Amino acid sequence: MNEIASALYSELEAKGWLLADGATGTNLFAAGLPAGDPPELWNTDRPKPVELLCRQFVEAGAQLVLTNSFGANSARLKLHGKESQSREISRAAAEIARNVCDRSCRRIFVAGSMGPTGELLEPVGSLKKEDAVEIFHEQAEGLKEGGADFAWVETMSCLEELEAASEGIRLTGMSWCGTMSFDTASRTMMGVSPSEFAASSLSMTYPPIAFGANCGSGAQDLVATLLEFDVKNGRMPVIAKGNAGIPKFKEGRIVYDGDPELMAVYAVLARRAGAKIIGGCCGTTPLHIDAMRSALERAANVESSLDLSEVESKLGVLTAARANTRSNERRRTRRSRSRKN
């Protein structure tokens, strides 16, 4: 275990939880980023709003902030003719966050955000694994040069691509955290279940120092995902970074219907479900993070049991796809018990 991983674990042991930040893209769109433009280009072209957002998350109480580099790999940047600038843009993203966090009187971890390439690996697609490894390696090098403490691979749907990312990060010597998005009937888009991801995280050649779930549907679905992880085994901290409610299309743009009060409830339920690193994803503003911090600081009975009925009563009903999956699982359980009897 390296120094950064030890420091992260020490923080978690001392406090029991660590507050991560909220959304990057949706907040920058609200700050004027034109629809369809990649937020990552603002790191070099217009860094002030990126810096301001990072500072607002720190002032709200975040102890871990992600860099504005989710789509800064060469495969994604190729869509905008910027594929040769992956390392430069990633380095700038980390420098912005590092400079903000180093001015704080608290220890703030800078996590280098790395999203999927947007391509499918062989044999399903045409992207060779060795090329994927190099794509992630290039981005990770830029993040390391800019001062990121560790890499943060997020919103993944494919275990093979996650493995490629881990191999690319290993070449830099950085630690990494990994999250997948379970937004398709309690599975990722490529069919990975929470339990499969948990098992894979523990058995990887270069395993993460923390794993979990992000994005997906509403906050209630993310907490439901946590209940499918074996999160209380003590072997690896679990991450929860749920969306601020359900996305809805309003007046030509996507908005999220979760207010700060809802996300405060989500944060406490995520902790009760076993998450140690808790933040928000799409739609989560600094106001949401401030409410989450206050709720976590006041929280009691974190060891009490939690089931889906309580999750739904406090956060809203599960999305239709997950609810159908839950219903099917109940029917299978009843049939199994009937056969045994």
Image (spheres, helix red, strand yellow):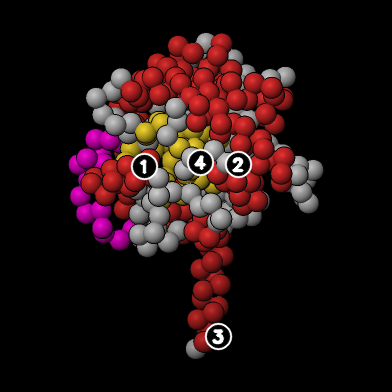
Residue 156 x/y as whole percent:
58, 44
Structural distance between the alpha carbons of marks 4 and 1 = 12 Å
- Of badges 2 and 4, nearer the viewer stands 4
Q: Where is residue 72? Give x, y as percent.
A: 60, 27
Mark 3 or 1 closer to N-term? Answer: 1
Q: Is residue 304 above or below residue 144?
A: below
Q: Label 3 belongs to which residue? A: 339
Along the viewing direction, whichever of 165 and 47 lies nearer the viewer? 165
The CA span between labels 2 and 4 is 10 Å
Q: CA distance from mark 3 to mark 1?
A: 53 Å
Disc 3 secondary structure class: helix
Q: Secondary structure at mark 2?
A: helix
Mark number, residue 135: none
User: Marks 2 and 1: in contact by CB < 8 Å?
Assistant: no
Which mark, by number, is residue 173?
4
In the visual, does 204 lie left or right of 75? left
Residue at image x 58%, y 36%? 115
Q: Residue at x 75, y 44 (%)?
A: 128
Q: Amino acid at mark 1?
A: Glu
Indicate the amino acid at tag 4. Answer: Gly
Q: Earlier in the sequence, mark 4 or mark 3?
A: 4
Q: Which residue is mark 2?
A: 168
Q: Quadrant of residue 108?
A: top left
Highlighted range, magenta: 290-308
